[in-house]
Image (cartoon, rainbow, N blue to C red):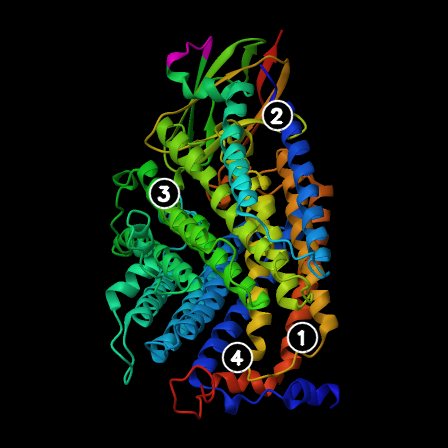
Amino acid sequence: MNFIQTLLKGEEGLFKPDTLTPMQKMTLRFVVVGLLYYGLVVLEGMIMRGYLVKPVVGLIPPAQYYAILTAHPLVGIFGSTYSIVFGAFLFLVPYLMKKPLWSIKIGNWICGLVGGGTFVFWLSGFITHYAPLYTLYWPLPADFTQFSLWGGIFFITGIALVMVGTVLFVINIFKTITYTPEGMKKQPAGALLGSALGLSGFRNLFTRNKKEHLVSLPVAAIARGTIDAALNSGIILFTGVLILVYMIAAVFGVNLKHSAVDALLYKNWFWWGLDLIADGLVLIFVAGTWYLLATLITGKKLFMENIARAALFVELVVSWTVWSHHLMSDQAQPGILKIVSGEMVTAFELITQGLAFFITLVTLWSARPLKMTNPLKFLLGGLLGFALAVPAGIIQADLGLNRILHNTQWIVGPHVHVAVLVGLTMTLYSAVYYLFPVLTNGARLYSEKLANIHFWCHLLGGIGMGAFMGMAGLQGMLRRTIYFEGEFLPFMILAALAGSLILIGFAAFFLNIVMSVGLNGVIGIFLPSKLKTKDLLPGK
Amino acid sequence: MVDSSLVLFGQTLAYTLYAVAIMAVMGWFGYRVTKQGKGREIKPALFYTFVGFLVLAGVSLHIITHETIPWKPMDLNRSAIKADKTFSINIANQKFILPAEKMVIRKGETVRFNVTSEDLTYGFGLFRADNSMVFQMQVLPGHMNDILWRFDRVGVYTIRSTEYSGPKGIGMIEKNAVEVVE
């Protein structure tokens, strides 16, 4: 097949969308949406990297720069990561529980709501420059002297759509774990739920009559992370409604007093909710995915499985009590919260994530020699990302060091971007490479060379960008600030070059996937399935 | 008092060494995991030793910084410490309202900055001439935001907001607003 034929029909024409089950199509739709938004995030990131080298105010005014800065992490978290993770877990939970998904229809709705909601808030920011950043510090989101009122209304509505999709995801996951499919023996819903949430495991600690775990460890991880997703969506929806109240009042010409909402209380509330993602579901989902990939790659039982289960439970509790590390520079925040929640509970993340890191490595080690496949190399990259980013986070969650690190490029470089780009994204790529032949009924990857380019460019670009941002941060460079006089130029040039590697890596991956499934195949994913079945895979 | 630049130098050194070490370990692991092993089982004792190491690292970081970074205990006890000098600063409409064009401090003095906001959440940071940070804090509307700092070096410092307050806030810089003299 020549290049054009492969571009249209995929590698050797092996990918045939007509053979896909509705479940496979639903999962692949999530992946396509997630990857397209990831591409948008990379492009936006590169625009901002260029702007930090040389702010071209004539081309991109500061208001537009901040609109990009507002949309960038939200598109990354919701449009890209949520899409890929939701799609993967809506497939994996029924796959691991050996029963159909509770509702494929709702699954497709979730994809539409998350993808559509992301487009709505991105577009409203792009057009109106609504830019309170993802932190939404009160009362900035309701400052209509700087921001468009209608832009804000559409922006918040877009976020709300994503949250509705998230709530449906939570329902679909827990219903799938607990329901009894038609024609199957009645399943113990309560016991399954207890096992998924870790209650039965907790009870086992205090009883001689130990009960068997009814759900596998990855399903337990997904269930526990989903608890945080549910709580988080509640917090964000409530916050969105609060902001909308101010907006709708303003539409009717009533200016509500900002002081009616206490800025510190709001900040505590908001960070409590936001950390359910950053320090909750991300870490829990990632640990669960590491465990799953390690067992799938090696075919071996997980090392210290019971401890891993317990650590996931601890991580869930930690995620509910860790938020105050974001308020260490808020002088009105009580000192006891800064020490207990900010320093001590945060330090637990070093332990829980360190355990997951160790357990995964030992499980891989026990199966030597392993072939360095794409899933394995990306998994190792993901492990390295968190091994770099978690200690960086522990360092900044210290009262003494936070005084000179807060809101510098250190926070977003070695911590946030290395965690998200290297740790999280490479873990997701590992899962994508692993699931690719399963979800496509044996389609073949177009080029191993492109996969290697993807790996090295992404790994070196992600670590390099984080490192140069961190160096600038240690020299005093702030995040969320535009420097017009080239104050940190050498670091920003190097960070931009490293960022370019990430872009090259993504381009290689994108080309590889498109050439593997073909443009016709991509379109076929979005057409209704011809198979009328709830089975996950054809004939199974 | 130990200067914040020295603390940052120490942090840079420690984290760089750690980053290089963990990358080397992962590189070694990636190479070795593809080779035939001796089949020796990893004992749980090694796992529990690793857990102990993580606990030690997590706890000792905060104890070490408490004992070596002077502004950490000072900040926690700041309400009980009497300042040699107090400056009250207000912020409104993305503009610092300073008590004087230049706030002059004598070397060795402990100074309290009381900063209030009339409208949005801002930041208050002090920066050296080379743009490196001396310290910062958040400034929330409706709350008293105060920081205590002891100045042991002669120098001229710039104030800038360290928190985003909308695009109008990008110019929140008061150059050379603080001077420490002999």
Residue B40 shows up from this direction: yes
Q: Are marks 3 and 1 in contact (CB under 8 Å)?
A: no
Q: Secondary structure of the magenta portion, mostly?
A: loop
Quadrant showing the C terminus of chain A: bottom left
Chain under disc 1: A
When asked about the image quadrant of residue A89, the answer is: bottom left
Same subunit, tags 4 and 2: no
Q: Are marks 1 and 2 in contact (CB under 8 Å)?
A: no
User: Secondary structure beneath disc 4?
Assistant: helix
User: Which mark is in front, 2 or 3?
Assistant: 2
Say what amino acid the circle numbered 3 marks.
Trp
User: Which mark is in front, 4 or 2?
Assistant: 4
Count residues near mark 2 (Cα–Cα under 10 Å), then give few for <14, some for 14-19, many for 20+. Answer: some
Say what amino acid the circle numbered 4 marks.
Leu
When asked about the image quadrant of residue A443, the answer is: bottom right
Same subunit, tags 1 and 2: no
Q: Are marks 2 and 3 in contact (CB under 8 Å)?
A: no
* Residue A237 percent location from the top left of the image: 31, 57
Residue B7's disc is: 2
Q: CA distance from mark 4 to mark 1?
A: 18 Å
Read off the residue under disc 4: A439
Magenta-span inclusion, residue B82: yes
Say what amino acid the circle numbered 1 marks.
Leu
Read off the residue under disc 1: A511
Q: Are marks 3 and 4 in contact (CB under 8 Å)?
A: no
User: Which mark is in front, 3 or 1?
Assistant: 1
Q: CA distance from mark 1 to mark 2?
A: 46 Å
